[in-house]
Image (cartoon, helix red, strand yellow):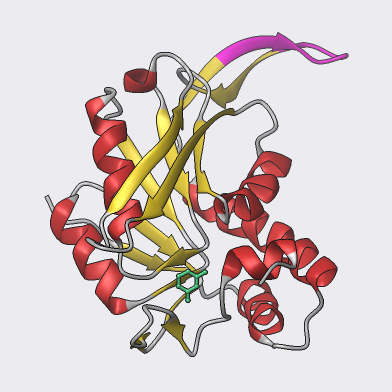
């Protein structure tokens, strides 16, 4: 199985990403534009969801009409920056279920350590869309997806705003069944594992922290 990286080159996505990258973009503007961008990314990541047909009545007559098939979607936010993407995704699919994974990086081993994990039931029957704005080293995404698979998830996609080639490679290698959806793949990582040129620390930019 070979996973694909889908770069969403829609002009609106690319324009909004440029505004998000600008260092002078304020916290409130950043949050607002990230939410709008997430909705557009969400549109692309849900493009091939399965449909079934149901019988309804319009005010004029009965008809067979398409509706989403199966259990409700599950968005999984990798905290804390994932929350910034989650809001836009929920604007698009308000009925989706939501899971959260909390991970921090152990300063000694640099491994991702889980501190929180809460998921809806029947993960195995849901399309699971994991969201985190920055796919940098890939360690958090890999850890979150490994855990989701242990909990039964079988259909997983990963959405980010920006990816580094290093993170893309690690995620594809470890989870070759998981497609990546991103607005751009940047040059690479600097010595502090920030994506360059990037947009800085996504969590700090969303919440106005340092
Ligand atoms: N996380 C961020 O928020 N920014 C980066 O550039 C890399 C990881």
Q: Is residue 191 above or below residue 85?
A: below
Is any part of residue 142 visible from this angle?
yes
The region drawn magenta spans 54-62
Q: Is residue 18 magenta?
A: no
Residue 63 image offset from top left, x and y in percent: 67, 15
- Which residue is rendered at x = 36% and y = 40% of the image? 114
Residue 60 appears at what percent x and percent y? 85, 14
Q: Is residue 161 left or right of residue 95?
A: left
Specify the quadrant of the image occupied by residue 15: bottom right
Most foreground residue, 33 or 64:
33
Is-magenta flag for residue 60? yes
Q: Residue at x 21, y 69 (%)?
A: 169
Q: How many labels, in total?
A: 0
Q: Residue at x 29, y 23 (%)?
A: 151
The residue depicted at 30 percent of the width and 62 percent of the height is: 138
| Residue 36: % across, % down | 73, 60
Left or right, residue 105 beside residue 69: left
Residue 130 horizontal side relative to residue 176, left or right: right
Percent x, y of residue 156? 34, 40
Q: Is residue 107 left or right of residue 203?
A: left
Q: Extreme front residue here?
A: 108
* Along the viewing direction, whichever of 105 and 117 lies nearer the viewer: 105
Q: Quadrant of the C terminus?
A: bottom right
Classify residue 29 by image quadrant. bottom right
């Amino acid at each position: 199985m070979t996973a694909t990286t889908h770069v969403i080159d829609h002009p609106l996505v690319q324009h909004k990403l440029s505004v998000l990258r600008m260092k002078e973009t304020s916290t409130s503007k950043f949050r607002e534009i990230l939410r709008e961008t997430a909705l557009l990314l969400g549109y692309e990541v849900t493009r091939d969801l399965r449909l079934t047909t149901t019988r309804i009545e319009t005010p004029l007559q009965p008809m067979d009409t398409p509706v989403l098939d199966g259990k409700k979607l599950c968005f999984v936010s990798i905290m804390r920056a994932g929350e910034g993407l989650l809001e836009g995704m929920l604007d698009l699919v308000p009925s989706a279920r939501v899971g959260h994974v909390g991970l921090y990086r152990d300063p000694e081993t640099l491994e991702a350590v889980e501190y929180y994990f809460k998921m809806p039931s029947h993960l195995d029957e849901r399309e699971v869309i994991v969201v985190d704005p920055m796919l940098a080293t890939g360690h958090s995404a890999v850890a979150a997806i490994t855990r989701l698979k242990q909990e039964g998830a079988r259909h997983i996609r990963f959405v980010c705003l920006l990816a580094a080639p290093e993170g893309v490679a690690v995620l594809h290698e470890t989870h070759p069944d998981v497609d990546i959806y991103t607005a751009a793949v940047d040059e690479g990582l600097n010595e502090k594992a920030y994506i360059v040129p990037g947009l800085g620390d996504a969590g700090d930019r969303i919440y106005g922290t340092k």
